Amino acid sequence: MGFLVKKNNSSSETGSSIVDELQQKITALSTENGALNGRIETSREVFKAQEEKFIALENEKNKLLSDNARLENANQNIEDKLKEHKGELEQLQEKFTTEFSIIANKLLKENASEFALTNEKRLGEILNPLKENIKQFEQKVDTNYEKEFKERTSLIEQIKSLEKLNIQMSEEAQNLTKALKGDNKAQGNWGELILEKVLESSGLIKDEEYSTQYSTTAEEGNRVQPDVIINLPENKHIIIDAKVSLIAYQNYINSEVEEELQNHLKNHVLSVKNHIKGLSEKHYITAKGMDTPDFVLLFMPIESSFGLALRADNELYQYAWDRKVVIVTPSTLLATLRTVASLWKQEKQTKNALEIARQAGALHNKFVSFLEDLERIKKGIELSNDAYDKAFNKLKSGKGNLIDATQKLEKLGIKTKKQLPENLLTLNENEDEEI
């Protein structure tokens, strides 16, 4: 009996030990499962960020394709107008040549050779500048057409390279992460480098449509130097400053412990807010020589870094806007810059159209002045003919005309070396017979 009791007690202790061991394994598996779930959630967030980036790139591509279609349509309209102006110019030149030929032939027939040569020289002095203006006008029309064609071709090539550029920048961001970590100066230089590449891809012309490291004076009197100044038509500006928030972001990506993840995420959001606050306190908007909207652009070169901060604090945009700052990334900034480039193209096209209209008006006025000069020449020729006829009549017509007087002197025996031309004597005889 005692043996059975002892055996039962031993079995109970063994069963309890197994239960404890199983409970410990269950607890360990539950902990491991929680860690795996955390990693899965992090992977989902990274995937979601990449998916959002892809969607943004797709939207940007669609927008650029739409802009390209709109610009092609605008270019076609300009091309049609240029052809129309060129046709009108050719018709005007043809009409001018015909009228000039008629007038010139008439003048040549009505006047003596010496007088005609004199007036032909005068006509040449009037005509040559007009021909030169017509030639310059044709060259300008051809130049504008070729320029618009090159710009349209360039736009198509830039659209093709857009997605490649964004992929390249993302790869560069990953490759430089280790080198940049902990070095604020290197981070700033890298951010400016990415900003410069976005500007180069935007189609804007450096030192004409945008400037880098522009230095001016703030309202308080201190020197300020924004990373980039975007020039707009009518002497307006947009200011861009590049900021990199990398350390806390990198720590968050590399961490696997939930508590550490939350701390790194808070530090990352705080880093972005500090950049916003620091940029706001520079007072670029009121700096000397700046005519800007009521905000500056803060450029964050790492798309996913900004996406993570925005998911952690969905009021981040409002926080920045309250401080007159707008956050942009490579994809959103490129869309903005492409819009600015389109504005400049439209501005130049408008100026070209106005210049064509101005030159066409000047050409019209020049042609009218030329016709007026021809009319004055015609009247001058008519007056010269009248004066010539009156003088010649005095020579051969009427009682006591010069030919009769000269003949009488010859008959009286004056010594002369030359005789009167026979044709003048004949004219005088005919005149006497008519009388």
Image (cartoon, helix red, strand yellow):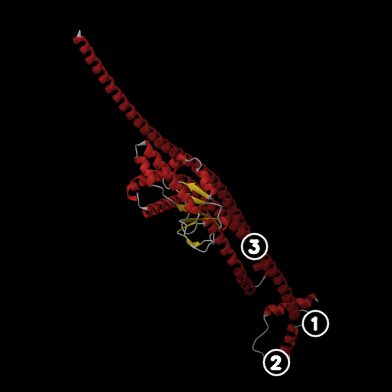
* Mark number, residue 409: none
Q: Amino acid at mark 1?
A: Lys
Report if the CB atoms under discs 1 and 3 are less than 8 Å apart. no
Locate residue 403 relative to residue 235 in the image: left or right.
right
Residue named by callout 2:
414
Q: Amino acid at mark 3?
A: Phe
Frontmost residue, 83 versus 1: 1
Residue named by callout 3:
367
- Label 1 crowd bin: few (<14), some (14–19), many (20+), radius 10 Å: few
| First in sequence: mark 2 vs mark 1 | 1
Q: Of circles 2 and 1, which is in front?
A: 1
- Label 2 crowd bin: few (<14), some (14–19), many (20+), radius 10 Å: few
Residue named by callout 1:
399
- Can residue 160 be seen here? The reply is no
Q: Secondary structure at mark 1?
A: loop
Q: CA distance from mark 2 to mark 1?
A: 21 Å
Image position, residue 269 (x, y; %): 44, 44
Q: Of circles 2 and 3, which is in front?
A: 3
Q: Quadrant of the C terminus?
A: bottom right
| First in sequence: mark 2 vs mark 3 | 3
Image position, residue 383 (x, y; %): 73, 73
Q: CA distance from mark 2 to mark 3?
A: 58 Å
| First in sequence: mark 1 vs mark 3 | 3
Residue at image point 48% right, 50% down: 276
Q: CA distance from mark 1 to mark 3?
A: 49 Å
Image position, residue 173 (x, y; %): 37, 46
